Amino acid sequence: MAIVRPQGTPLGGIILIPGSSTQQTISESGQPGSQDNFAIRVGRRLVAAGYAVAYVEDPSNLHAPIAAMRAIIRPVVLLGTSTGTIVELDNAVALGKDGPDALVFTSTVTVPNAYFTHAVTALQISRLRVPVLFVHNTNDQCKFSLLADAQNVAAADRDALFEQVTSDPAPAADQCGPRSPHGYLGIEQAVVDRIVDWIAGHANARADS
């Protein structure tokens, strides 16, 4: 795991979980290997916004990374994108009180795929007891993360906030790839702004409780 801190005291800690296999190699200098992925691509923007961010090689069990981040600052938020949303949800449900203070799902995957035999489900979402933000692009054409399906899953948590954003379609792109609406191409800063505004208003209250 590599943690990058902002100048001064962090406002909170965010553990970033990329898509695809969700696993990545971190260099000796602390640089993540999957820098094209949305969750990793916006890491520097989150640091610039005042948050400490953590890159994890294998996020399948985040007990230790969450504890390490919590020793630095709270709230500790998981931010996953695409198949990373499956892993963050699995961790939150399994870890309970030792889990994150809040969850941010971006491009939520609701259909099993080549990487995972399960997906984000309404049943699991209904078991969450922490603040939850869903962000979804209205032009996301990835067959594993369609807007209507994500909305239906999010509705299982009546306290969750579902935020829609829109970027230009990318007809020639891999619709499930990072350089498409699925990866928020061209609107990265606008998405980051929404996320950090929500964290400031919701995750801090959980961490203080």
Image (cartoon, rainbow, N blue to C red):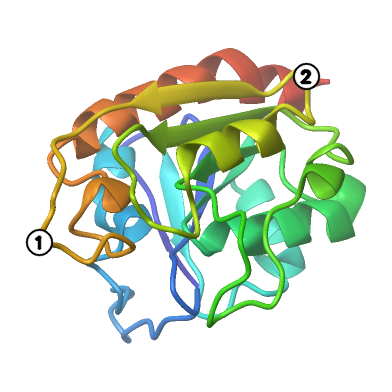
- Dot 1 lies on which element? loop
Res 10 seen here: no
- Dot 2 lies on which element? loop
For marks 1 and 2, the one nearer the N-term is 2
Residue on which disc 1 sits:
172
x, y (%) of residue 171?
13, 54
x, y (%) of residue 201?
56, 13
Towards the viewer: 7 or 97: 97
Q: Is residue 4 left or right of residue 42?
A: right
Quadrant of the image containing the C terminus: top right
Towards the viewer: 85 or 143: 143
Q: Is residue 167 left or right of residue 79?
A: left
Towards the viewer: 50 or 117: 117
Identify the amino acid type marked 2.
Arg
Instruction: Classify 47 as above or below 18.
Output: above
Tag shown at residue 113: none
Q: Residue visible at 83% across and 38% down?
A: 128
Residue on which disc 2 sits:
158
Instruction: Classify 163 as above or below 113.
Output: above
